[in-house]
Structure formats: structure tokens, C-alpha cells
Image: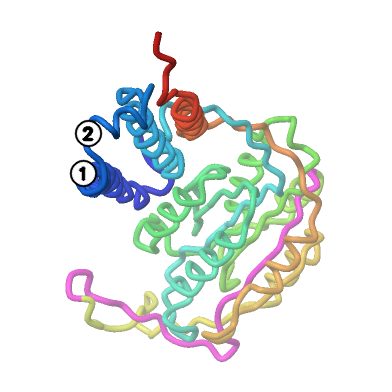
Amino acid sequence: MIWQSPFLLWLFILIPVLGLGLWFHSKLLKAKRKQFFNEELFQKLRQGFWKPGDILRSVFVLVGLSFLILAFAGPKIGTEVREVKRQGIDMLIALDLSASMNAEDVRPSRLEKAKFEINRLIERLKGDRVGLVVFTGEAYLQSPMTLDYSALKLFLDIADTDQMPSSATDFKAAMETALVAFESLEENATEAAKVLLIISDGEDHGQSYSESLEKLIDKNIFVYTLGIGTDAGTTIPLYEKNSGSLIGYKRDRSGKVVTTSLQSEVLRQIANTGNGTYYAIERGNDGIDAFLARVDELEKGEFSSQEYADYKNQYQWMGALALFCFTFAYLVPTYRKEN
């Protein structure tokens, strides 16, 4: 059992206080009565008075008040199954986890900024199913399509460049994995808009993605891109895992320090071909608000109704018992005809 307003249970302190007050009041009246009437005369004046009825009335008033306090506190017992209908879009976020995403031309880093903006996106969604794909030279479905945003955030939190076997970037792998994820959705949600949001710095070192992109278009999947980084570019820092201290910068095979910059043209081309829009984050205060506004305009679909169990309100029973006690107290006679 749980309570809707448990702080109201403190009102139970009033019940014994009222009981003592009634008892003290009766004693006070009896003492004053003795000052003006003798017992024999008073009994004649109150002929037919039924003392048990008077006591019973007081008891039921106090019991009724107790049930009324319980009703206001809102007891919830057992479970209640409710049907919830969800309306929204199907969205898959493809997050680049290549080594270049550790660059810090966007603070605190490209990857951390991307994760921050994805969290903002998730918090704004209402009824949309969202999944997460992480990719470099390979791609994995980190989180399948879900309405459980808390679980999605957990999968997002553990996303890191160190978890991937490759440090390069291949958009084709991300698109193919996304296509499989969309095709696995049930048929009754086909009216919902399907969106793939690719978040990357645009450095593609993989195979041609044209054929994979065409397959997404054929499935009526809108492809949006979000570029993170600056055109000027920067180096890729390397940190010691345990202490977090800077130990150097990423170098190529010849020993030269690698620099990375935002390849916006690649991402812009993907979005234009995929019937989507390209957005960019080039500074720490930039966000994906424009994309969030676009999401609200997309066609919503109704997903399978979900049922969930919740505690069932029982306050009405407490209220009914309180009403019964008050009614009974009102009907209890305090006088009876004597034979």
C-alpha cells in the first residue's frame, strides 16, 4: 500500500485529542450541573435519555473522521491495468565514435557535446520511439527502438570511442545497420515518419554509401545529419585512462600529429539526398534546436497500445465508510420512550 498524500495521516493526532476533548467537556458539564440541580431532579428533566446512544454517536463520529482522513490521504492498494496509446515518430540516432570525435574544437569535446545534445533531444520527445546506433568502420545497434528513454540514456552514457574496434568512419556501415533496425519494426506503425539522424564530424574513410542511402530513401526514411566540429580543425588529444592526464596527441603512421576538421560537405550531401536537412554545431553554445523543431512537424503514427500496472486508488471506499459512520451517528437515538 502507498499513499497519495501521506502527510495528511498526521491528522490522526486530532482523533484522540477530540476524544479527550469530548470526555473533558462531559465532565465539565456534569460538574456545572451539580451546582444547579440535584441528581434526582436532573433525571426527571432528562427522562428517556439513553446514555449508550450518546456514547455510540460520539464513537461513530470519531470513527467517521478517521475514515475521512484516510480518504483524503489517498490509499492505493493492489494494481490497476491501464491502456496507453503512443503517438510519435520512429527515430534512429547514428553516433560516430571514431577517434576524431575526441577532438576538442567543440567543448568539452565533439563526442561529449554530441551526447549532451542527444540527451536534450530525448528529454524533449513525447511518445517517439528512439534507438541508438554507434559506428566507426563498423556499426552496432547500441539500443533498439524503445519508448523507455531512461534505458536509452544509459546506453548513451556508456558510448565511448574506446568501445569500437576501429577508429575510422564508415557511413555505409551505419546506414546498413539503421536499415535493418527500421525493417524490424512491426507493420502497424508504418504511418509514422521514420528518421535517421547521423551525428558525425563528416570524415568518411569507408566504402561508398550511395547504394545504402538509396535503400533508406526507398523505405521512405528521412536522413538528417548533424555535423560537429570546426572548419579550422584541431588535433586529437590522448588521455591516460586512469588519471585522465594528457599524454600526447594522435599521430599517423609516419609519426605526424593528426589534425581533424569538420567535413560539412559530405554530411550536407547525405542530408540533401536523403530528403533531410543538415545542421551544424561549431561552438559549445550551439545546439540542435532547429532539428528539434523539425521533429515536431513530422507525421506522427500511433504505436501499439501499451498496458502497465499501477496502484489502484481506494479512497472512495474510505469515503463511503466515513459517510456511513456519519449517517449512523446522526440516526442513533439519544432518547427512547420509556414503557
Comparing 274 with 165, the one in front is 274
Label 1 belongs to which residue? Answer: 34
* Residue 225 placement (x, y as % from top left): 67, 66
N-terminal of the pair, mark 2 or mark 1, is 1
Density class for disc 1 (Cα within 10 Å; few <14, some 14-19, many ≥20) is few
What numbered label is drawn on residue 61? none
- Please determine whether, in this image, residue 77 is positioned above or below residue 30: above
Tag 2 and tag 1, C-beta contact below 8 Å: yes
Can you identify the residue that label 2 sits on? Answer: 39
Q: Residues within 10 Å of mark 2 (few under 14, many from 20)?
A: few
Q: Is residue 217 highlighted in magenta? A: no
Identify which residue is drawn at 68% across, 37% down. Answer: 85
Asked whether, in this view, residue 59 is left or right of residue 98, the answer is left
45 versus 158 height, above or below: above
Q: For the residue marked with disc 2, what is the amino acid? A: Glu
- Report the Cα–Cα distance between label 2 and label 1: 7 Å
Pick the quarter of the image with the C terminus.
Answer: top left
Quadrant of image for the N terminus: top left
Q: Which residues are magenta?
A: 219-243
Position of 50 relative to 66 (above/below): above
Q: Is residue 292 left or right of residue 282?
A: right
